[in-house]
Image: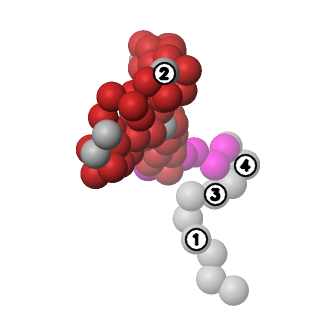
Amino acid sequence: MLLYVGFPTLLGGGIFMMSYGPILDAVGDPNVLVLVVSTVVTLVFLPFVVLLVYTFHIASIASRTADFGPFVPRVGFEE
């Protein structure tokens, strides 16, 4: 999933950085330029969001199914 999201995102971000000058000349309106740049920056960080979601997913499953091993009793002792 990260390869499907990551490679096109990095390619698109690189193309955007190389063509920022012509985009700046073509848009003209600063408000539209802010919208375009913020959209591209959001898309560039999309692989990190996917990785973070998968990490939280694995951590939540691991916290629910954690086994402490055969040498730790499952019953709590009162001291």
Name the residue at 55% across, 65% down: 75
What is the x, y in percent for residue 39?
Answer: 34, 39
Magenta residues? 64-69
Distance, label 2 to label 3, CA atoms, is 63 Å
Query: What residue does disc 3 label?
Result: 73
Secondary element at image label 1: loop
Number of marks present in the image shown: 4
Q: Is residue 73 left or right of residue 36?
A: right
What is the x, y in percent for residue 1?
Answer: 42, 18
Amino acid at the residue labelled 3: Pro
Name the residue at 67% across, 43% down: 70
Amino acid at the residue labelled 1: Gly
Query: What residue does disc 4 label?
Result: 71
- Among the two numbered marks 4 and 1 on one chain, the one whose residue lies closer to the N terminus: 4
Amino acid at the residue labelled 4: Phe
| Magenta segment includes 65 | yes
Secondary element at image label 3: loop
Query: What residue does disc 2 label?
Result: 19
Give the answer, above or below, for where 3 lies relative to 49: above
Of the pair 55 and 6, the residue shown nearer to us: 6
Query: What residue does disc 1 label?
Result: 76
What is the x, y in percent for residue 32?
Answer: 27, 44
Give the answer, above or below, for where 17 lies relative to 57: above
Quadrant (top left, top right, bottom left, bottom right) of the C terminus? bottom right
